[in-house]
Amino acid sequence: MEIIEFDNEVYPKFQASGNASRFILPFAKEFCKGEGYDIGYCKKEWKLENAFGIDIDDTSNIYHANNLPETKVDYIFSSHCLEHVDNWVETLEYWISKIKNNGILFLYLPDFSQKYWRPWNNRKHKHCLTPDIVKSFLKDKRMKDIFCSGIDLNNSFTIVCSIP
């Protein structure tokens, strides 16, 4: 087994190689139906099948995480992206505004339990998110049917909700 060590902790090496979405895509396909976006997919082969891919912050492209097409969609799927944006609250509010009523927001996020992913250790990450923080935000924004998973073997968690 290939591992990485960080701060006296051992993690699977794949956690440092990208494509975290591979661990959640089968589950996401159960929720993400119709027309939608995969925000932050990074590589074409990592994108949620049938989703329109949106880069996280490529401002040379017309669309990025904070500039989506005008039309509302049935879902937004995003894996290991929200921790990279400048202001996750504003970005998440914006994403919610781009989803149709009864549409789905599906997030797969790195958990605080993986020390390497904390912003003071990994400067690509700007935020530490936990299930409780994201779930509280979504409750305060009056989202419906909020499902929050536990921490998986990839030190990540899933939050799924419906847009009222």
Image: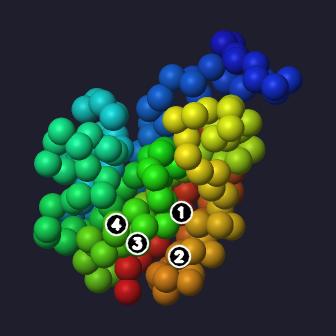
> Circle 3 — which element?
helix
Position of 91 compared to 109: left or right? Answer: left
Q: Position of residue 94 (x, y in %)?
A: 34, 69
Using a 10 Å C-alpha cutoff, classify the residue at mark 3 as few (fewer than 14 neighbours), some (14 to 19) or many (20 or more): few
At x 55%, y 41%, the residue is 125
Query: Would you say the residues marked 1 and 3 are in contact, meaning their CB atoms lie under 8 Å apart?
Result: no
> Circle 1 — which element?
strand
Inter-mark Cα distance, 1 to 3 = 15 Å
**Disc with the residue nearer the chain's start (1 vs 3):** 3
Position of 1 compared to 82: left or right? Answer: right
Q: Position of residue 105 (x, y in %)?
A: 40, 66
**Disc with the residue nearer the chain's start (4 vs 1):** 4
Tell me the number on the disc at residue 103: none
Position of 29 compared to 135: left or right? Answer: left
Query: Would you say the residues marked 3 and 2 are in contact, meaning their CB atoms lie under 8 Å apart?
Result: no
Q: Which residue is mark 3?
A: 93
> Circle 2 — which element?
helix
Looking at the rendered image, the quarter that the N terminus falls into is top right
Inter-mark Cα distance, 4 to 2 = 12 Å
At x 68%, y 32%, the residue is 121
Looking at the rendered image, the quarter that the C terminus falls into is bottom left
Q: Which residue is mark 4?
A: 95
Q: Position of residue 55 (x, y in %)?
A: 28, 43
Q: Which residue is mark 1?
A: 159
Tell me the number on the disc at residue 138: 2
Residue 126 seen in this snapshot: yes
**Disc with the residue nearer the chain's start (4 vs 2):** 4
Query: Would you say the residues marked 3 and 4 are in contact, meaning their CB atoms lie under 8 Å apart?
Result: yes
